[in-house]
Image (spheres, grey):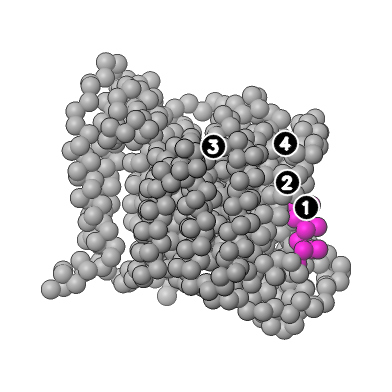
Amino acid sequence: MWDNLVLGFSTIATLPALTAIVSGVLIGILCGVLPGLSASTAVALMVPFTFGMDPLVSVLLLVSVYLAGEYGGSITAIAIGTPGTPPAAATMLDGYELTKQGKPGLALTTSVVASSIGGMIGAIVLFAFSEPLARVALSFGAPEYFSLAVFGLAIIASLASDNLLKGFLIMLIGLFLTTIGLDGFTGEERYTFGIPKLMDGISFIPALIGLFAMSSVFYDVEKGFSTAKSVALSFAMPKLRELAGLWKVYLHSSLLGSIIGVLPGAGATITAFICYNEVKRFSKNKDKFGKGCLEGVAAPEAGNNAVVGGSLVPLLTLGIPGSATSAVLIGALMLHNIQPGPLLFQTNGEIVYGIFAGLFVACIAQLILGLIGVPLWIKVISAPKPLLLSVIAVISVVGSYGYNNSIVDVWVMFAFGLLGYILKKLDFPASPIILALVLGGILEENFRRALIISGGEYKIFITQPISATLLAMAVLSLLSPVLMNRLARKTN
Amino acid sequence: MKVLEQLKNTDRIFAMVIIAVSMVLYWYIGGMEEPYSPGALSASTYPRLVLGCTIFVSLLLIFRPARLPAKSDSTSQRGVLIIILMVAYISLLETVGFFILTPVVLILIPIVAGLKRYRLILLSVFVVLLGLYGVFVEVLNIPLPQGLLGE
């Protein structure tokens, strides 16, 4: 185990790898700071910049953007009371209160310390659980992979929206889209409409860029823009004793965040609010929550950064994304011909352990850049958003074109951008479609393979113990929102 | 009348569109070759299964009791303009060329979005174009559409 850790650190001890980590953290914080640019959008936009890079360096860049993007949102939430990213809405509850009390420095420092500790604990969880889980996953066959994909999709559909049917419908649309192209079993064309480029199926990276980046351009241009409020730059820093006194909160929320991150689809926003509520529940200062309590800043920040390491566990060990952002990472890995899954530990060990080590180094870079860069980040908040939107639009086009040097991919990106925009307007969640695009192929392939193995017997999915357990968990996760609603109504 | 009111709900309209599209796609795939090995599914079975589920869930969305009015924003002129602008940009990209069209887009998007700081917009055009050329052409060696400049 320790040898692997040493391998990881020695793999990333190169100038390109370290530069990628520091650049990724800088870009991630910048994107997180800007309201409307989530960590997922930032990662999707950065994928085109990795086209010619070494696989490990590109993954390190994207993972660092992911980590720092989750943290960056808290700066805006604390400084101007507008969450830079959705998870930062939980941080805002107490963080902005502290700013109103003239203590933004206290909140901002607590936020970066908690985020970095959360990220490190997430990296430890990733390191500790990935290899054993990958060993278990080696015994998985077609029925198990099918049921795992069903479980992942069920959680995503049930958590993505307050309306289960909406989440489920969008997930089905995503599953259908993965059937476009040549059938992997028979070689027959499905829904290619005579377009040769569609024979390989829908290009995943342009689709992601469209869903994340282009849709936000359409949506945000329509909303118009307002100049951000000015922020006072002089503030007092907290004492080390105050920060150290929060160790229980860091630990509690980081572990909780890591565990939730492992579950497919849970994501950083849900985690941030769960951590906030859990810490509040056990706190001696319950009454101070919402009025500028440091624990209320530390809990969601530690939790949402710990999600990063947690969400990489299913990605690296099973090839299943733990969140929408890790779905983008899967796309980026595949772009470099790296197939995530249990075999990755044997075939590309240096990449896996390099990611562990890189996540650790990224947390340290985030802590340093977060502490010294606060005045700069606050200036970024007041940058005019329309300029940023035009840059996002052009990068989306050039990035999609560069994927295959094909205008068809640009149209795919545009179509998905339009779809994402319509979904946002109609209040439908977009994340199920993204995860369905990743899991759809796994689902169909293993469904059909399992049926061939069993000679057409559907019971193969329930006679295999792991497969049956995963299917039962899928049903439970679909029923849980309904049961919880009924329980809540009875209690009321 | 009550049914008509319910159908006005955007969720239901969306679900009806999805049903219509799914039915067309269900029919469009047509008959595929029957597989030889026992248990193997034909290439059309899985997509049809997914489309069947899509129609079923859409029907549930249409006929579920309306609890809350679905949130939907009206599309503003800006939204339509930006979509038309992007369609024109992508359509002409290969013919006119990336480095001729992109400055136009970089100027028009902020203006459509309501920014009136024209000097800043022009400065950003220069910086972004230089940055994109440096990264994509010089570093990543991605050939961007030359269009008129390539002839």
Report which quarter residue B9 is drawn in.
Answer: bottom left
Distance between mark 4 and mark 3 Cα atoms: 31 Å
Q: Camera-side residue: A61 or A238?
A: A61
Q: Residue furthest bottom?
A: A101
Q: Residue furthest front?
A: B151
Q: Secondary structure at mark 4?
A: helix
- Region rendered in magenta: A363-374
Nearer the camera: disc 1 or disc 3: 3
Residue at mark 4 shares a chain with residue at mark 3: no
**Above or below A235: residue A221:** above
Number of the label disc, if any, that sits on residue A82: none
Q: Is residue A281 left or right of residue B69?
A: right
Mark 4: amino acid: Gly
Q: Which one is earlier in the sequence, the residue at label 2 or at label 1?
A: 2
Distance between mark 1 and mark 3 Cα atoms: 34 Å
Mark 2: amino acid: Ile
Distance between mark 4 and mark 1 Cα atoms: 16 Å
Question: Magenta stretch containing residue A476, yes or no?
Answer: no
Mark 1: amino acid: Ala
Q: Residue at x 80, y 78 (%)?
A: A234
Q: Camera-side residue: A345 or A33?
A: A33
Nearer the camera: disc 4 or disc 1: 1
Write down the chain letter for disc 1: A
Q: Residue at x 36, y 34 (%)?
A: A198
Number of the label disc, if any, that sits on residue B143: 3
Number of the label disc, if any, that sits on residue A21: 2
Q: Secondary structure at mark 3?
A: loop
Dominant secondary structure of the magenta stretch? Answer: helix
Q: Is residue A141 left or right of residue A258?
A: left
Q: Residue at x 60, y 61 (%)?
A: B124
Residue at mark 1 shares a chain with residue at mark 3: no
